[in-house]
Image (cartoon, rainbow, N blue to C red):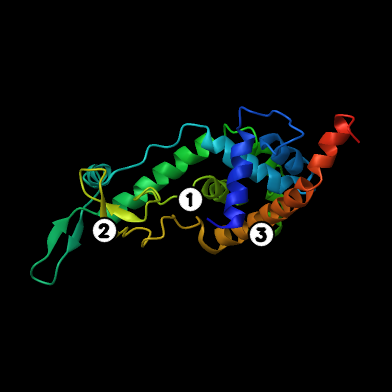
Amino acid sequence: MTATADFDERLTLAASSSDLTVSLERRGDVDLLIAAGKAPFPVGRMVYQLMTEWGGCAKPKRLTHEDIQRLAETIPRVTMGKKGRKVQALDLPGARAAAEELLATERRRILGRLKSLPALMDPHAGLLPWVVARGMADPSVKLLDVLGWWADRNCTACNGTMWQVLSGTNVQSKTPCKVCHGSGRRPVPHGEDGRAISEHIERNVDRARAGARRALKSVPLLKHFAAGKV
Protein backbone atom coordinates (compact mmCIF):
# COMPACT_ATOMS: atom_id res chain seq x y z
CA MET A 1 0.00 0.00 0.00
CA THR A 2 1.37 3.43 -0.93
CA ALA A 3 1.70 6.27 1.56
CA THR A 4 -1.13 8.10 -0.21
CA ALA A 5 -3.45 5.08 -0.08
CA ASP A 6 -2.54 4.52 3.58
CA PHE A 7 -3.37 8.12 4.48
CA ASP A 8 -6.63 7.94 2.52
CA GLU A 9 -7.65 4.78 4.35
CA ARG A 10 -6.76 6.23 7.76
CA LEU A 11 -8.73 9.39 7.06
CA THR A 12 -11.74 7.46 5.78
CA LEU A 13 -11.71 5.11 8.78
CA ALA A 14 -11.29 8.03 11.19
CA ALA A 15 -14.52 9.56 9.94
CA SER A 16 -16.44 6.50 11.14
CA SER A 17 -14.38 5.87 14.29
CA SER A 18 -16.15 5.31 17.60
CA ASP A 19 -13.11 6.53 19.55
CA LEU A 20 -12.69 10.28 19.19
CA THR A 21 -10.78 10.72 22.43
CA VAL A 22 -8.43 13.70 22.43
CA SER A 23 -5.06 12.78 23.89
CA LEU A 24 -2.09 15.09 24.40
CA GLU A 25 0.30 12.14 24.39
CA ARG A 26 -0.71 10.33 21.22
CA ARG A 27 -2.19 10.86 17.79
CA GLY A 28 -5.69 9.45 17.40
CA ASP A 29 -8.49 9.41 14.89
CA VAL A 30 -9.72 12.77 16.12
CA ASP A 31 -6.38 14.34 15.13
CA LEU A 32 -6.98 13.32 11.53
CA LEU A 33 -10.48 14.79 11.61
CA ILE A 34 -9.21 18.06 13.07
CA ALA A 35 -6.57 18.24 10.35
CA ALA A 36 -9.11 17.47 7.63
CA GLY A 37 -11.39 20.19 8.98
CA LYS A 38 -8.56 22.72 8.82
CA ALA A 39 -7.72 21.87 5.20
CA PRO A 40 -8.98 24.65 2.89
CA PHE A 41 -10.51 22.38 0.25
CA PRO A 42 -14.05 21.43 1.34
CA VAL A 43 -15.05 19.65 -1.88
CA GLY A 44 -12.21 17.17 -1.53
CA ARG A 45 -13.14 16.63 2.13
CA MET A 46 -16.72 15.90 1.13
CA VAL A 47 -15.55 13.20 -1.29
CA TYR A 48 -13.76 11.53 1.63
CA GLN A 49 -16.96 11.83 3.64
CA LEU A 50 -18.99 10.28 0.83
CA MET A 51 -16.61 7.31 0.71
CA THR A 52 -16.95 6.89 4.48
CA GLU A 53 -20.75 6.99 4.34
CA TRP A 54 -20.77 4.50 1.46
CA GLY A 55 -18.57 2.17 3.49
CA GLY A 56 -21.13 2.11 6.28
CA CYS A 57 -24.28 1.50 4.23
CA ALA A 58 -25.88 -1.53 2.58
CA LYS A 59 -24.40 -2.15 -0.86
CA PRO A 60 -26.04 -3.29 -4.10
CA LYS A 61 -26.25 -7.07 -4.37
CA ARG A 62 -23.38 -8.47 -6.39
CA LEU A 63 -24.50 -10.53 -9.36
CA THR A 64 -22.99 -14.00 -9.76
CA HIS A 65 -22.29 -15.81 -13.02
CA GLU A 66 -25.49 -17.76 -12.42
CA ASP A 67 -27.43 -14.50 -12.04
CA ILE A 68 -26.06 -13.33 -15.38
CA GLN A 69 -27.05 -16.60 -17.02
CA ARG A 70 -30.59 -16.39 -15.65
CA LEU A 71 -30.83 -12.82 -16.91
CA ALA A 72 -29.54 -13.91 -20.32
CA GLU A 73 -32.39 -16.40 -20.56
CA THR A 74 -34.88 -13.53 -20.40
CA ILE A 75 -33.46 -11.53 -23.32
CA PRO A 76 -33.26 -12.37 -27.05
CA ARG A 77 -30.58 -14.87 -28.01
CA VAL A 78 -27.77 -14.12 -30.44
CA THR A 79 -26.73 -16.02 -33.54
CA MET A 80 -23.25 -17.48 -33.36
CA GLY A 81 -21.08 -19.73 -35.48
CA LYS A 82 -19.91 -19.83 -39.07
CA LYS A 83 -22.10 -19.85 -42.15
CA GLY A 84 -24.03 -23.08 -42.36
CA ARG A 85 -23.40 -23.96 -38.71
CA LYS A 86 -25.06 -21.09 -36.92
CA VAL A 87 -26.70 -21.62 -33.56
CA GLN A 88 -28.73 -19.53 -31.15
CA ALA A 89 -26.81 -18.81 -27.96
CA LEU A 90 -27.37 -16.91 -24.74
CA ASP A 91 -26.34 -13.28 -25.03
CA LEU A 92 -24.09 -13.21 -21.97
CA PRO A 93 -22.41 -9.88 -22.86
CA GLY A 94 -25.84 -8.33 -23.33
CA ALA A 95 -27.01 -9.78 -20.03
CA ARG A 96 -23.96 -8.42 -18.24
CA ALA A 97 -24.56 -4.98 -19.75
CA ALA A 98 -28.16 -5.12 -18.55
CA ALA A 99 -26.97 -6.23 -15.11
CA GLU A 100 -24.49 -3.36 -14.96
CA GLU A 101 -27.30 -0.91 -15.68
CA LEU A 102 -29.39 -2.45 -12.90
CA LEU A 103 -26.44 -2.08 -10.53
CA ALA A 104 -25.92 1.52 -11.66
CA THR A 105 -29.56 2.31 -10.90
CA GLU A 106 -29.28 0.75 -7.44
CA ARG A 107 -25.99 2.56 -6.83
CA ARG A 108 -27.62 5.90 -7.66
CA ARG A 109 -30.47 5.14 -5.28
CA ILE A 110 -28.08 4.40 -2.41
CA LEU A 111 -25.91 7.43 -3.15
CA GLY A 112 -29.03 9.59 -3.05
CA ARG A 113 -29.50 8.69 0.62
CA LEU A 114 -25.99 9.73 1.72
CA LYS A 115 -25.77 12.97 3.68
CA SER A 116 -22.70 14.33 1.91
CA LEU A 117 -24.09 13.97 -1.61
CA PRO A 118 -26.15 17.21 -1.76
CA ALA A 119 -23.04 19.32 -1.08
CA LEU A 120 -21.14 17.58 -3.88
CA MET A 121 -24.08 17.95 -6.27
CA ASP A 122 -24.71 21.59 -5.32
CA PRO A 123 -25.24 23.50 -8.59
CA HIS A 124 -23.47 26.55 -7.17
CA ALA A 125 -20.69 25.34 -4.89
CA GLY A 126 -20.13 21.62 -5.41
CA LEU A 127 -18.63 19.64 -8.28
CA LEU A 128 -21.59 20.13 -10.60
CA PRO A 129 -20.74 23.68 -11.80
CA TRP A 130 -17.44 22.41 -13.22
CA VAL A 131 -19.21 19.60 -15.08
CA VAL A 132 -21.90 21.93 -16.44
CA ALA A 133 -19.27 24.44 -17.55
CA ARG A 134 -17.69 21.75 -19.73
CA GLY A 135 -20.92 21.43 -21.70
CA MET A 136 -21.38 17.74 -20.95
CA ALA A 137 -24.75 16.17 -21.68
CA ASP A 138 -26.65 14.91 -18.62
CA PRO A 139 -24.14 16.48 -16.22
CA SER A 140 -25.95 15.46 -13.02
CA VAL A 141 -26.23 11.80 -14.04
CA LYS A 142 -22.60 11.62 -15.13
CA LEU A 143 -21.34 13.27 -11.95
CA LEU A 144 -23.48 10.99 -9.78
CA ASP A 145 -22.23 7.87 -11.55
CA VAL A 146 -18.59 8.95 -11.29
CA LEU A 147 -19.03 9.69 -7.59
CA GLY A 148 -20.46 6.18 -7.35
CA TRP A 149 -17.28 4.90 -8.98
CA TRP A 150 -15.20 6.76 -6.41
CA ALA A 151 -17.26 5.22 -3.63
CA ASP A 152 -17.10 1.71 -5.09
CA ARG A 153 -14.83 0.99 -8.03
CA ASN A 154 -14.53 -2.77 -7.59
CA CYS A 155 -15.17 -4.90 -10.66
CA THR A 156 -18.70 -6.28 -10.42
CA ALA A 157 -17.64 -9.67 -11.80
CA CYS A 158 -14.74 -10.52 -9.47
CA ASN A 159 -15.62 -8.10 -6.64
CA GLY A 160 -12.19 -6.54 -6.89
CA THR A 161 -10.26 -9.78 -6.37
CA MET A 162 -8.80 -9.64 -9.92
CA TRP A 163 -9.41 -13.37 -10.44
CA GLN A 164 -12.22 -15.24 -12.10
CA VAL A 165 -14.61 -17.00 -9.73
CA LEU A 166 -15.37 -20.64 -10.49
CA SER A 167 -18.95 -21.06 -11.67
CA GLY A 168 -21.36 -22.05 -8.91
CA THR A 169 -18.84 -21.34 -6.14
CA ASN A 170 -17.14 -18.50 -4.31
CA VAL A 171 -13.75 -20.02 -5.09
CA GLN A 172 -11.25 -17.96 -7.04
CA SER A 173 -9.52 -19.52 -9.99
CA LYS A 174 -6.00 -18.80 -11.21
CA THR A 175 -7.38 -17.10 -14.30
CA PRO A 176 -7.50 -13.28 -14.40
CA CYS A 177 -11.02 -11.87 -14.45
CA LYS A 178 -12.20 -11.56 -18.05
CA VAL A 179 -14.36 -8.52 -17.33
CA CYS A 180 -11.74 -6.25 -15.73
CA HIS A 181 -8.73 -8.05 -17.30
CA GLY A 182 -7.24 -8.64 -13.88
CA SER A 183 -7.28 -5.01 -12.69
CA GLY A 184 -9.94 -5.59 -10.04
CA ARG A 185 -11.65 -2.34 -11.03
CA ARG A 186 -14.60 -1.48 -13.18
CA PRO A 187 -14.04 1.27 -15.75
CA VAL A 188 -14.96 4.86 -14.98
CA PRO A 189 -18.50 5.27 -16.36
CA HIS A 190 -19.41 7.55 -19.27
CA GLY A 191 -16.19 7.25 -21.21
CA GLU A 192 -14.16 10.39 -21.86
CA ASP A 193 -16.57 12.64 -19.98
CA GLY A 194 -16.49 10.34 -16.97
CA ARG A 195 -12.70 10.21 -16.96
CA ALA A 196 -12.52 14.01 -17.11
CA ILE A 197 -14.91 14.28 -14.15
CA SER A 198 -12.90 11.70 -12.21
CA GLU A 199 -9.67 13.60 -12.84
CA HIS A 200 -11.33 16.78 -11.57
CA ILE A 201 -12.48 14.96 -8.44
CA GLU A 202 -8.98 13.57 -7.97
CA ARG A 203 -7.48 17.06 -8.11
CA ASN A 204 -9.84 18.18 -5.35
CA VAL A 205 -9.07 15.10 -3.27
CA ASP A 206 -5.32 15.60 -3.76
CA ARG A 207 -5.58 19.19 -2.51
CA ALA A 208 -7.65 18.15 0.49
CA ARG A 209 -5.20 15.36 1.30
CA ALA A 210 -2.18 17.66 1.05
CA GLY A 211 -3.94 20.27 3.18
CA ALA A 212 -4.84 17.70 5.82
CA ARG A 213 -1.26 16.44 5.95
CA ARG A 214 0.05 19.96 6.46
CA ALA A 215 -2.59 20.70 9.09
CA LEU A 216 -1.84 17.45 10.92
CA LYS A 217 1.58 18.80 11.88
CA SER A 218 0.00 21.66 13.82
CA VAL A 219 -2.64 19.57 15.63
CA PRO A 220 -0.43 18.73 18.67
CA LEU A 221 0.12 22.44 19.29
CA LEU A 222 -3.61 23.11 18.94
CA LYS A 223 -4.43 20.39 21.46
CA HIS A 224 -1.91 21.69 23.97
CA PHE A 225 -3.20 25.23 23.48
CA ALA A 226 -6.81 24.09 24.03
CA ALA A 227 -5.72 22.27 27.19
CA GLY A 228 -3.98 25.38 28.51
CA LYS A 229 -0.57 23.76 28.28
CA VAL A 230 0.94 26.50 26.10
- Image side of residue 145 versus residue 125, left or right: left
Tag on residue 153?
Answer: 1
Q: CA distance from mark 2 to mark 1?
A: 22 Å
Q: Residue at x 71, y 57 (%)?
A: 133
**Which is more N-terminal, label 1 or label 2?**
1
Look at the picture and state if 20 lies above or below 163.
above
> Which residue is most to the front?
25
Q: Which quadrant is the C terminus positioned in?
A: top right
Residue where numbered disc 2 is placed:
174
Q: Residue at x 68, y 58 (%)?
A: 203
Tag on residue 135?
Answer: 3
Q: CA distance from mark 3 to mark 2?
A: 44 Å
**Can you give x and y, in whole percent of width and height, for residue 206 in the image?**
68, 56
**Can you give x and y, in whole percent of width and height, for residue 31 in the image?**
72, 38
| Number of residues whose C-alpha sits closer than 10 Å to that of mark 1, classed few (under 14), some (14–19) or many (20 or more) | some
- Image side of residue 16 versus residue 32, left or right: left
